[in-house]
Image: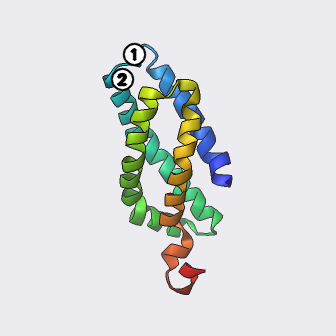
């Protein structure tokens, strides 16, 4: 909840606002606009938000900088590929069918499930293995 409300929600709200300003002169009904918005999100926003999420989660779990960096190196591309599998289709739906004023709400619903995946993938218990992983 802390990560969602203090990190993800403000960054997402800012991102959607900025993206709408950047594409304000584009026709929002055109598939090319939808694909460009989705591509921008995957190329720019996704790597930033995923790195921030993984870093803050590591700090909240009491990890040191070196441990967080190792976790980023170990799991970033797996997380990024998962991000593309979830968010690229969600973005296509969002930018094509969801009114701009409801996109953050739509993204929050998708983000609930995405966040569960991120926690599962980057959790300290999982990376420790053994008995702690079951606790």
* Residue 113 placement (x, y as % from top left): 52, 53
- Looking at the image, is mark 2 or mark 1 earlier in the sequence? 1
- SS for tag 1? loop
Assess whether mark 1 and mark 2 are in contact (beta carbons under 8 angstroms).
Answer: yes
Q: What residue is rendered at 44% in x and 44% in y?
A: 46
* Residue 122 placement (x, y as % from top left): 50, 65
- Quadrant position of the C terminus in the picture: bottom right
- SS for tag 2? helix
Q: Nearer the viewer, residue 63 or 93?
A: 93
Q: What is the number of the mark on residue 33?
A: 2
* Residue 12 placement (x, y as % from top left): 56, 38
The residue that mark 1 highlights is 26
Q: What is the number of the mark on residue 43?
A: none
Q: Nearer the viewer, residue 33 or 98?
A: 98
Q: Nearer the viewer, residue 99 or 36?
A: 99
- The answer to which quarter of the image holds residue 25 is top left
């Amino acid at each position: 909840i802390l990560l969602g409300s203090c990190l993800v929600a403000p960054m997402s709200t800012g991102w959607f606002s900025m993206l709408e300003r950047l594409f304000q002169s584009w026709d929002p009904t055109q598939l090319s606009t939808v694909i460009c918005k989705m591509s921008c999100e995957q190329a720019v926003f996704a790597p930033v938000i995923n790195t921030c999420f993984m870093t803050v989660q590591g700090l909240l779990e009491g990890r040191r900088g070196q441990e967080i960096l190792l976790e980023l190196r170990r799991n970033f591309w797996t997380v990024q590929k998962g991000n593309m599998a979830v968010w690229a289709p969600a973005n296509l739906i969002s930018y094509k069918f969801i009114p701009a004023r409801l996109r953050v709400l739509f993204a929050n619903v998708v983000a609930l499930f995405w966040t569960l995946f991120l926690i599962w993938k980057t959790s300290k218990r999982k990376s420790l293995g053994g008995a702690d992983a079951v606790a």
